[in-house]
Image (spheres, grey):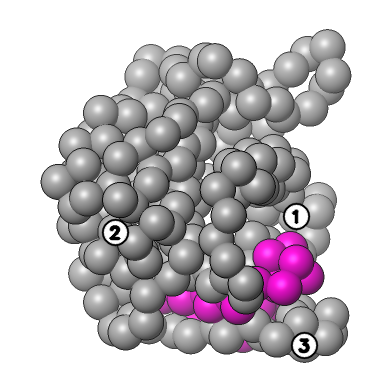
């Protein structure tokens, strides 16, 4: 199972040198990253993971999630199908003096288990998201947390996530998303439940006109983020 489809892996590989440019092709990820981190930390703080917790970021790209958690003292591993993305992540983490394990491998090749597993903006890019959810759940330690974020398959998400974001505002590279691959929350919850992970929360990630920034919300028609707990 590929972490991303071949076409989308090629897109991310071609743009790998721009991962850490906040005004580049991945500026939308930089924009929502503080929201994702706030969400994750708020749930982790209410769910102690013990000393030296470990985190696996599946489809890590340039390491936007890996680096903040490494600074917090986590044992962080990031995997991606793109060798170019892994190289960019390794170079940036080295420049920041961060000890992060990056590997160009598929999720099936991961042998360790982790306190936290991340599937952020990756489920909509794979051929078999149900299988990826199952494998990711199996890599989670008992009592661990699995975080996921993706786009809901709605008319709103097509307009906002593709027509507007890619073609007009250029928040994401053209061809990054395919609407039919977007996932409804129920299409994530059921595979996770079968794999022993219970969803504890799902929140929307919405643009606020008032604050001129991305915020957590109750609206799930576009982007959303969630967390599951392994009993």
Counting residues from the start of the chain, the first of labels 2 and 1 encountered is: 1
Query: Can residue 14 be seen in this snapshot?
Result: no
Read off the residue under disc 3: 94
| Residue at (21% x, 57% y) in the render | 134
- Picture quadrant where residue 211 is located: top right
Counting residues from the start of the chain, the first of labels 2 and 3 encountered is: 3
**Is residue 20 positioned above or below 188 on the image?**
below
Query: What's the distance in space between the residues labelled 2 and 3, CA to CA?
Result: 30 Å
**Magenta stretch containing residue 102, yes or no?**
no
Image x and y of residue 29, in percent: 65, 48
- Picture quadrant where residue 86 is located: bottom right
**Is residue 219 positioned above or below 201 on the image?**
above
219 on left or right of 42: left
Q: Name the foreground residue: 226 vs 43.
A: 43
Which type of secondary structure does the marked residue at label 3 adopt?
A: helix
**Is residue 151 positioned above or below 101 on the image?**
above
Start-end of magenta stretch: 68-89
- Crowdedness near tag 3: few (<14), some (14–19) or many (≥20) residues, C-alpha within 10 Å: few
**Is residue 70 positioned above or below 211 on the image?**
below
| Residue at (81% x, 51% y) in the render | 23
Q: Name the foreground residue: 11 vs 191.
A: 191
- Crowdedness near tag 2: few (<14), some (14–19) or many (≥20) residues, C-alpha within 10 Å: many
**Residue contact between numbered discs 2 and 3, judged by CB atoms under 8 Å:** no
Label number found at residue 137: 2
């Amino acid at each position: 199972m590929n972490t991303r489809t071949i076409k989308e892996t090629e897109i991310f590989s071609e743009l790998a040198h721009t991962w850490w440019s906040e005004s580049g092709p991945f500026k939308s990820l930089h924009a929502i990253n503080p929201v994702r981190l706030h969400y994750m930390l708020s749930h982790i703080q209410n769910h102690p993971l013990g000393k030296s917790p470990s985190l696996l970021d599946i489809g890590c790209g340039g390491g936007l999630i890996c680096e903040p958690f490494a600074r917090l003292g986590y044992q962080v591993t990031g995997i991606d199908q793109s060798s170019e993305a892994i190289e960019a992540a390794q170079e940036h983490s080295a420049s920041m003096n961060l000890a992060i394990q990056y590997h160009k491998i598929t999720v099936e090749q991961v042998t360790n288990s982790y306190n936290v597993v991340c599937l952020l903006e990756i489920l909509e890019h794979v051929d078999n998201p149900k299988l990826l959810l199952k494998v990711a759940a199996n890599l989670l330690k008992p009592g661990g947390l699995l975080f996921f974020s993706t786009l809901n398959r709605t008319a709103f998400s097509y307009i906002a996530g593709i027509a507007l974001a890619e073609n007009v505002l250029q928040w994401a590279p053209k061809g990054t998303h395919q609407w039919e691959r977007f996932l409804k929350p129920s299409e994530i919850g059921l595979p996770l439940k079968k794999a022993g992970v219970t969803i504890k929360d799902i929140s929307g990630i919405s643009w606020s006109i008032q604050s001129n920034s991305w915020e957590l919300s109750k609206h799930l028609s576009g982007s959303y983020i969630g967390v599951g707990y392994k009993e």
